[in-house]
């Protein structure tokens, strides 16, 4: 039976896809959805509690952190969860790209490297945020050290934006090149990643409280949408083992090895006829 491959915005369907490959596809999809969901919950929590911006007076920063240590503790705990989810997703995506013929492998490698850098930067970001909360408990008024830690926390967040943008672009281009995602997701990834990279260029200004931070926020939203959509597509897809460039003629139901097996038999039949004559 020949294998027919169609492109309809999802992964091509291979009859009888291997259970291990199908399990990998679903694990990567679930990881993407879990990461997007956790980040959405985290941002929703911030919207509800109204944390200070990096440009707000330092007195407001101190007061908010002294009153909301639990919010920060939850957020930092989520960042610890985001590290394995992010690295697991991009590593799994790279494996899927390799199994599908390697188209987009360079982009997936870029995504893995950028995600590793992003994880390291967010670790620094979280450590500085913990320091901000612990210092706020014992201060009646802001100190120069408290203000410095807060600015370093802001700088770490600003430097995380280009790392996230690079991860976004690499993952989006890799998924599209390997036919795991349709063209519109590639456009979303490049546009959203470009916004994050642009915001990262203003890291110094953002650490000093500039509103240029908001340039990157649509990129973060695009990242969450892309993760959710990609995760759902991976869960719905049914083929992982067939390389993206493998094609066969649906009208030809004979495998190559069948043709090679028949050729010696044909030669033998001709020889037998000659001898009979």
Image (cartoon, rainbow, N blue to C red):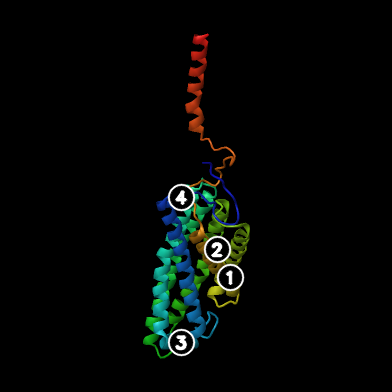
* Mark 1 or 4: the one toward you: 4
The secondary element bearing badge 3 is classed as helix
For the residues bearing labels 3 and 2, Cβ distance under 8 angstroms: no
For the residues bearing labels 1 and 3, Cβ distance under 8 angstroms: no
Tell me the CA gap for discs 4 and 3: 53 Å
The secondary element bearing badge 2 is classed as helix
Give the label on residue 64, or none.
3
Mark 3 or mark 1, which is nearer the start of the sequence?
A: 3
- Residue beneath disc 4: 17
Q: Determine crowd level at label 1: few under 14, some 14-19, many 20+ residues with C-alpha closer than 10 A.
A: many
For the residues bearing labels 1 and 2, Cβ distance under 8 angstroms: yes
Tell me the CA gap for discs 3 and 2: 29 Å
Tell me the CA gap for discs 1 and 3: 24 Å
Mark 2 or mark 3, which is nearer the start of the sequence?
A: 3
- Residue beneath disc 1: 216
The secondary element bearing badge 1 is classed as helix
What percent of the width, then of the height, locates residue 194? 61, 63
Q: Quadrant of residue 143?
A: bottom left
Residue at position x 53%, y 61% in the image: 233
């Amino acid at each position: 039976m020949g294998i027919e491959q169609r492109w309809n915005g999802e992964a091509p369907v291979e009859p009888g896809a291997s259970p291990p490959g199908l399990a990998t596809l679903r694990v990567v999809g679930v990881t993407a959805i879990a990461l997007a969901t956790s980040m959405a919950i985290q941002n929703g929590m911030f919207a509800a509690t109204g944390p200070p911006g990096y440009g707000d007076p330092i007195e407001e920063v101190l007061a908010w952190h002294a009153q909301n240590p639990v919010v920060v503790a939850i957020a930092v705990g989520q960042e610890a969860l985001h590290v394995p989810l992010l690295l697991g997703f991009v590593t799994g995506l790279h494996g899927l790209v390799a199994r599908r013929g390697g188209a987009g492998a360079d982009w997936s490698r870029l995504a893995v490297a950028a995600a590793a850098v992003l994880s390291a930067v967010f670790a620094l970001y979280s450590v500085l945020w913990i320091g901000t909360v612990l210092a706020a408990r014992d201060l009646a008024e802001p100190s120069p050290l408290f203000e410095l830690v807060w600015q370093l926390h802001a700088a770490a967040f600003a430097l995380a934006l280009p790392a996230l943008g690079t991860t976004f672009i690499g993952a989006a281009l890799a998924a599209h090149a390997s036919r795991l995602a349709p063209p519109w997701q590639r456009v979303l990834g490049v546009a959203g990643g470009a916004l994050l990279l642009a915001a990262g260029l203003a890291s110094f200004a953002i650490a000093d409280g500039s509103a240029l931070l908001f340039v990157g926020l649509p990129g973060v939203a695009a990242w969450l949408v892309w993760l959710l959509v990609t995760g759902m597509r991976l869960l719905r897809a049914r083929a992982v083992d067939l390389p993206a460039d493998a094609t066969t003629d649906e009208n030809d139901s004979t495998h190559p090895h069948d043709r090679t097996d028949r050729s010696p038999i044909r030669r033998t039949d001709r020889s037998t006829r000659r001898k009979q004559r």
